[in-house]
Image (cartoon, helix red, strand yellow):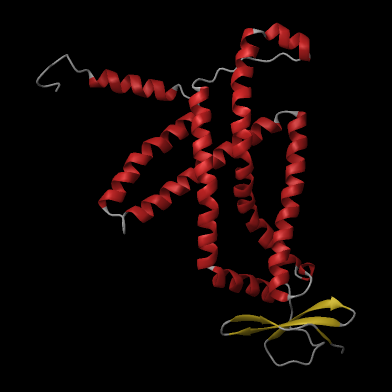
Amino acid sequence: MQLHCPGKYEFTEIRRAIVNWYEKLDRRQQLYLNVILCLPFLGYFYLLDAQNLFAPISILFFIYCLGVAAYDVYRIYATLYGTLIGKGFIAIAFAVGSNLAFSISGEIIGRMTHVPPTTFPHTLSFLAIFAIPFLFMAAGTIFIPVSVVMAPILIYGSRFVAEAPRLMKWFLGVEFKAMGNRYIIATVFFQAIFYSSFGSLAPAIFLLLLNRYNQQIELTIGKSIYEFDMYPGTECKMATGYHQASLGDENYVLASKQSTGITFEQPKKCAL
């Protein structure tokens, strides 16, 4: 078009204007726009090869969406950490998350070994660390309704603060700065759709992976208990290859390494 109609179509100026507009957006808005721009390419790959090409591309797209969600979590954390009340909320959330992670890990270990999970502190700690990302996904489901409810309050509240800053300072005793973000309604609308979709897909993908690799996960947990939390003691007269862990009062739990994995036996009383 530039060859046939010189001077009529200035694509260079259009591209420069688009780039300038993109660079003026907030970082989170840029990431949201990137997600939207990826959707047509994702549909193109689905039409091109839904069996082979679409699957790895969709996995990469899901990982990118995880990164966008992680950036939002970091942004909210940085905002809360800047205030005294926010630090209190972070401390409460950390305590709740830690207890949930240890509770979930203890439930898994107790179901496998049929003994108190505190008998295996190292594996309990390892498993609790790996449970933290799944707790973030569970927390994301809480963020969805809260963000939808708080969206109109933030939108109209920011407008009121911008129009009546002296009244807000007199009424609350705090001076608010006007929010300089653009496209607030579009951003909140995208967040509602994005996190609703993400909150419905993430648990489904997690359960799919858990069911597919359940045997490998249990095998890894059993090996961790066998190697890190048990020892080849002599209190119980057993064959070679058995490890044991003390339950107190001369009671021990025994485990042996089999071809199918680690086998945990019923606790028994042993003494030298």
| Left or right, residue 172 beside residue 141 | right
Q: Quadrant of the N terminus?
A: top left
Q: Nearer the viewer, residue 248 or 106?
A: 106
On the image, the x and y values in percent for residue 16 come to 32, 21
Q: Nearer the viewer, residue 57 or 200?
A: 200
Report which quarter residue 10 is drawn in. Answer: top left
Residue in the picture at 32% in, 42% down: 41
Q: Nearer the viewer, residue 52 or 231?
A: 52
Residue in the picture at 76% in, 68% down: 117
On the image, the x and y values in percent for residue 72 come to 57, 36
Q: Quadrant of the C terminus?
A: bottom right
| Left or right, residue 11 beside residue 4 | right
Above-or-below relation of 183 to 120: above
Asked if residue 27 can be seen in this view, the reply is: no
Residue in the picture at 77% in, 30% down: 85
Above-or-below relation of 209 to 133: below
Above-or-below relation of 217 to 73: below
On the image, the x and y values in percent for residue 146 come to 64, 35
| Left or right, residue 42 beside residue 215 | left
On the image, the x and y values in percent for residue 3 come to 11, 22
Report which quarter residue 221 is drawn in. Answer: bottom right
Asked if residue 68 can be seen in this view, the reply is: yes
Above-or-below relation of 119 to 2: below
